[in-house]
Amino acid sequence: MKIKDLAINESGFVFNPYTGESFSVNATGYEILKLLRTDLSQEEIVNELTGIFEISKDQAEKDVLDFLNILEKYDLLEK
């Protein structure tokens, strides 16, 4: 699963060059976006988040699923 080619800076500002829209994400969203640019699976992303933020696997899974649903809603995932 990959995101479309978005411009993302370290402070969490995200720009969609296809639509001109921009938005901000929190630290978790920023890390998920960075990890989606790699070839990691959803499970691997969850595992990465547990280490980065020292959270439970259940919490990381919820965070990833919630964020992916938002990305899908706004058509930001590659098909």
Image: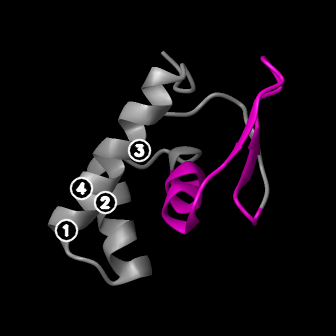
**Residue 13, horizontal then vertical, whole percent:** 75, 52
Asked if the residue at tag 1 contacts the one at tag 2, i.e. Cβ–Cβ closer than 8 Å, the answer is yes
Look at the numbered disc 2 and give the secondary structure of its residue: helix
* Kind of residue sitting beneath label 4: Glu
- The residue drawn where x is 70% and y is 58% is 12
Look at the numbered disc 3 and give the secondary structure of its residue: helix
Q: Is residue 32 magenta?
A: yes
Q: Is residue 41 left or right of residue 10?
A: left
The span from disc 4 to disc 1 (Cα, nearest Å) is: 6 Å
Please give the range of residues in magenta: 10-35
Residue 61: mark: 4
Query: Is 24 drawn above or below residue 48 in the view shown?
Result: above
Look at the numbered disc 4 and give the secondary structure of its residue: helix
Residue 1 visible in image = no
Residue 57: mark: 1
Q: Disc 2 or 1, which lies upstream in sequence?
A: 2
The span from disc 3 to disc 1 (Cα, nearest Å) is: 15 Å
**Residue 43, horizontal then vertical, whole percent:** 26, 52
Residue 68 visible in image = yes
Q: What residue is disc 2 on?
A: 46
Q: Residue furthest bottom?
A: 54
Q: What residue is disc 3 on?
A: 67
The span from disc 3 to disc 4 (Cα, nearest Å) is: 10 Å
Asked if the residue at tag 2 contacts the one at tag 4, i.e. Cβ–Cβ closer than 8 Å, the answer is yes
Q: Disc 4 or 2, which lies upstream in sequence?
A: 2
